[in-house]
Image (cartoon, rainbow, N blue to C red):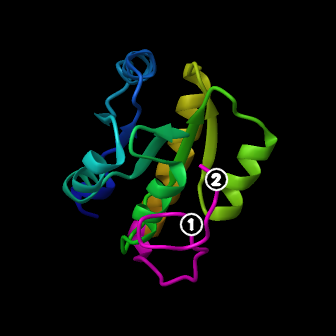
Amino acid sequence: MSGVATTVRVLALLPTRDDQTSLNEIFGHSNWNLQFVEGLGQARVMIDDLVPGVVISDCRLPDGCWQDVLYELQRRKLEPPLIVASRLADEGLWGEVLNLGGYDVLATPFQAQEVFRSVSLAWRHWREEFRIGARPVTKAKVAGAAGGLMLKC
């Protein structure tokens, strides 16, 4: 297996410094690789350059929302799991994220145990997909610049 699938690489789209600081402190107790961007525009380049095994996105971004991030990830051959972060994490958001193809929802402010659990499971899922190779699957369209269903972000 190549180095891509043996290092936990996480791309976090978090526009607020408080969330960035909190997640950075949590990741500081691990050997995971964490990179931050504040919006979707920056993330498009980082997704290809970093090849993250997991992406964490705030529910709302300065230039989009989590559905836009999901759309960008679904365009990749080997889609990293998306974990959505929100101060208003509830069953409705969790259901919407899972139904559209996201992996999980984390409430902010972040709790270390929940972050480790969710990121670990998401990365293991991605690593297994990496090992067996990306399989073409039919995915739901989500709101995004290229069209799709118009969902409220």
- Label 2 amino acid? Lys
Queried whether the magenta region covers residue 137, the answer comes back as yes
**Main SS category, magenta section:** loop
Q: Position of residue 37 (x, y in %)?
A: 30, 37
Say which element carries label 2: loop
Categorize mark 1 by other alpha carbons within 10 Å: few (<14), some (14-19), many (20+).
Answer: many
Alpha carbon distance from label 2 to label 1: 10 Å
Q: Which quadrant holds residue 111?
A: top right
Quadrant (top left/top right/bottom left/bottom right) for the N terminus: bottom left
Q: Is residue 30 visible?
A: yes
Q: Is residue 52 above or below residue 38?
A: below
Relative placement, left or right, of 53 versus 50 is right
Q: Position of residue 21 (x, y in %)?
A: 38, 16
- Per the rendered image, the range of residues in magenta is 130-153
Q: Nearer the viewer, mark 2 or mark 1?
A: 2
Q: Which residue is mark 2?
A: 152
Residue at screen point 55% across, 21% down:
112
Q: Which residue is mark 1?
A: 142
Q: Is residue 58 visible?
A: no
- Label 1 amino acid? Val
Q: Which quadrant holds residue 108?
A: top right
**First along the sequence among labels 2 and 1:** 1
